[in-house]
Image (cartoon, helix red, strand yellow):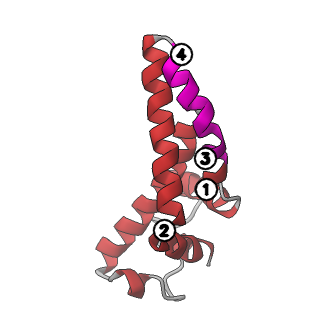
Amino acid sequence: MAQLVLGALYAVVLVLYAVSRIRLGLGHHELLQPQYDPKDLVPFGSSALNPFSWLYVPSLFYVMLQGWVIGAVLAPISLVLAFIGSERGRWLAATATATSIVVAVLFLSSFGQDIYVWYLD
């Protein structure tokens, strides 16, 4: 279950990236320029009353602390549970394993490294 939460936090990062590109009409390399700070691109601004800000802060810590590593470490355990768990547990464990693998591969790609640098800028 923790892997799914970690995957959701990375999805928040990717959604902010996609929304920012669409809203500003910029290409990938243009958005990565220093003038486009992610905290300034949170929809409806950064404030304590904005729920999008509540999603930004945990996702920032996820990226800062390289949360994908935790998911990658938990993936083999989930894979074992996918084979020996109950019917519902198998699907949940298999989904968690797949999520961790996708996030790790995406994070380790050049695109993921660009997003990492942009998000922590």
Q: Residue furthest top?
A: 86
Say whether residue 15 is magenta. no
| Crowd tier of the residue under label 2, counting other residues whose Cα lies within 10 Å: few below 14, some 14–19, many 20 or above | few
Q: Which residue is mark 1?
A: 48
Q: Which mark sits nearer the N-terminus, 4 or 3?
A: 3
Amino acid marked by disc 1: Ala
Asked if residue 84 shows in the view, the reply is yes
Q: Which residue is mark 3?
A: 72
In this rendered view, identify the residue nearer to me: 98 or 33: 98
Q: Nearer the viewer, mark 1 or mark 4?
A: 4
Give the alpha-carbon distance from disc 4 to disc 3, as whole Å.
20 Å
Amino acid marked by disc 2: Ser
Secondary structure of the residue carrying tag 3 is helix
Give the alpha-carbon distance from disc 1 to disc 4, as whole Å.
44 Å
Give the alpha-carbon distance from disc 3 to disc 2, as whole Å.
15 Å
Q: Which mark sits nearer the N-terminus, 1 or 2?
A: 1
Find the magenta span and give its range.
Answer: 70-85
